[in-house]
Amino acid sequence: MRGPYDVLVVGAGAVGLSIAYELARRGASVAVIEKEAEAGFGVSKGHAGVIHVLQLPLGSLKSRLAIYGNKMYDKWAAELGVKPWRLPALLVASSPLQLPLVLLLYPFLRAYYGRRGFAISLVSGRELREREPNLNALGAIRVDGYAVADPFELTYRLYEAAKEMGAEFYFNVEAELLEESEEGVKVKSSAGAFSSRYAVNAAGLYSDLLAGERLKPKRGVMVVFDRLQAKSIVAPISLSQLVRAETKGGGIIPTAWGHTIWGPGFSEGDKEDTAVYPQDVMALLSRFGSLVRRKGRLLKGYAGVRPASPARDFMMFYSPRKRIVHLVGIESPGFTALPALALMVLKMLQRSGLSLGAPRLPRPPKPLTRELLAAGKEVRGEKGKILCHCMRVSVGDVLEAMERGASTLDGVMFRTKLGMGPCQGQHCMGRAAALLLKLRGEVTKSGGNSWIAR
């Protein structure tokens, strides 16, 4: 049996990593078990990296944590060496029939979010054309306080910082049962037993199996274009979406690396269904296509599955003896809520008897090869050789990705953006796989039996 630890965290997605990081930097001994081959390979790899302001239903736990998390993000991310890109969101009217909705919703949103420190303003058609000449829209509500971050960068910095602070990670290990007693928690897993004083169930789509609850997974599909189409996050205004209070309906989202994402579109799904179907793409093109004049090249579509709960809200609760904190239904805006959600879990553990010290700061990350090359600095030798010309990924970037924990081709891609440019890996994927094979003796796409070469 491994342990005992102060806290065992089930799940190495962004939620589990943020909790492990906050615990470890306060002196707790932490273990993290994850059924995938690497951190962030579950729910965390299937979203667009938006840091939200508006979140329905208003007054829900997820709405409140999104507000608190948004306000904490800049300082929290800066400590990790990550810089979110702050930009406004525009709720746009693209037809004369939608203009009354702008005037109807504006005072309500201004009253609710203005009191919480977010600027809400009206944008006339003329102002909109000046700011966003690539849009076909007649007017908008502008919401300040949004941001876009690279979700992979943040996930891997959390992983590295938690490890630096002493957290131990066990990958390819699936939690099967959490048993609590007055003394602590025993975790039965596919790799044997672990013991800890407390446990946190942050297993994403599979958290319900450990918590005895039920999820209603929703599949969200997104499409990616190769150019920036707007300087703001853009969403068509929709009264029906607001009334249903389930989702805001997606939008046109600039990314931190110069692409644009449309989506997500939602449908009922199951936990393993990450396929992109023709009707998904057609629905997104129909919803957003008329809003944008120059679209660029459609690169790909991808899907993520949300661990949505029947309650339409985050479910954060204790086990009977208060030794386990269960997190169920942590869907959007979980990425926004991360710093606030992690602190809420810490407070729950402290109320159950866990003692924590003052937080330490992680070391600043060392400059990566791509950052040195982007700054015009010379990188000598093989490390400076470019593998992916579309995204300017070098041999040094791949080597650094492996040093930081990448053991699969997907892990290298997510960390470096290899193969995510216009050619979609036609010229670089084979080179990267050959390099991985040389260094590791085997290559899988995402671990397990997804073999490419060995």
Image: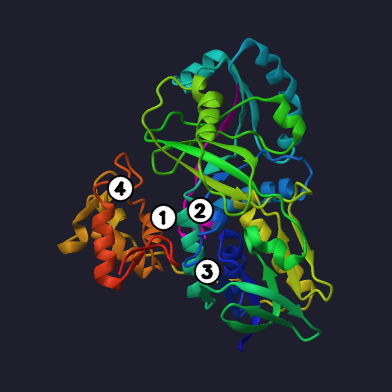
Q: Is residue 388 above or below residue 251?
A: below
Q: Which residue is mark 4?
A: 425
Task: Name the residue: 55% across, 51% down.
Answer: 74
| Distance from Cα at disc 1 to Cα at disc 4 | 13 Å
Estimate the x, y position of residue 29 in percent, counting from the top left.
Answer: 60, 81
For this view, does 263 lie left or right of residue 341? left
Judge whether residue 169 is colored magenta.
no
Say whether disc 3 or disc 4 marks the residue closer to the N-terminus.
3
Q: Which residue is mark 3?
A: 361
Give amino acid for label 1: Phe
Judge whether residue 90 is colored magenta.
yes
Q: Which residue is mark 2?
A: 45
Quarter location, residue 3: bottom right
| Distance from Cα at disc 4 to Cα at disc 2 | 18 Å
Nearer the observer, disc 3 or disc 4? 4
Give amino acid for label 3: Leu
Nearer the observer, disc 3 or disc 2? 2
Estimate the x, y position of residue 312 in percent, counting from the top left.
Answer: 75, 46
